[in-house]
Image: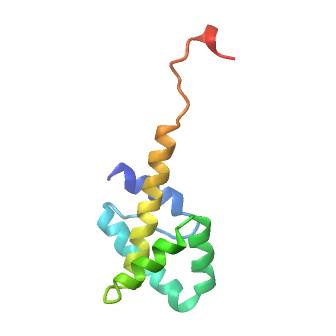
Amino acid sequence: MEKEVIVIQEALSADFDLSGCESREALLKRLSAEINHLIQADFHRLIAFLYRLDISEIKLKQTLEENTEKDAGELIANLVVERQLQKLATRKAFKPQDDIPEDEKW
C-alpha cells in the first residue's frame, strides 16, 4: 500500500471509512462516492468538511465551473487528496530536527 494512501486514510478516518483502499485510485473512487452521497444527502456536512480541511473556495468553484461535464464528487475528492498531500509535504518540510547536538538544545 502506498504511504500517501495510508496518511490520507488516517487523516480522513473521522469522516469517512476508507479502509481497504490499497491504491490512490481506489481511495479516490471511494472518496468520490462518499462525497456524492454528501452532496445529495447532507450538503451542510460536506461544506463543514471542506472548510475544516481548508479547501480553497475559489479553487473549488473554479474547478467545478471549468469541468461541468465531470462528476462533482470526483473533482472534490481530487481536491481533498491534493490538499492532504500538501499538508503532508508541509509537515515534512517543517519537521523538527533530531540531529541537534545535546549541548546546543535549549
Task: Please indicate, yes or no, whether residue 34 appears anywhere in the rendered image.
Answer: no
- Taking the image as shown, residue 66 lies to the left or right of residue 56, namely left
Query: Residue placed farthest to the right in the image?
Result: 106
Q: Position of residue 94 (x, y in %)?
A: 52, 37
Q: Residue at x 37, y 67 (%)?
A: 27
Can you tell which quarter of the image residue 63 is in?
bottom left
- Residue in the foreground of this view, choosing between 22 and 76: 76
Q: Quadrant of the C terminus?
A: top right
Q: Position of residue 75 (x, y in %)?
A: 38, 77
Q: How many marks?
A: 0
- Taking the image as shown, residue 41 lies to the left or right of residue 74, namely right
- Residue in the foreground of this view, choosing between 51 and 45: 51
Examine the rendered structure and indicate whether residue 60 appears above or below residue 2. below
Q: Residue at x 49, y 69 (%)?
A: 17
Task: Please indicate, yes or no, whether residue 12 appears anywhere in the rendered image.
Answer: yes
- Residue in the foreground of this view, choosing between 20 and 38: 38
Examine the rendered structure and indicate whether residue 48 appears above or below residue 1. below
Can you tell which quarter of the image residue 51 is in?
bottom right
- Taking the image as shown, residue 1 lies to the left or right of residue 34, namely left
Q: Residue at x 64, y 16 (%)?
A: 105
Q: How is the image coloured?
A: rainbow
Q: Residue at x 45, y 85 (%)?
A: 36
Q: Position of residue 67 (x, y in %)?
A: 34, 83
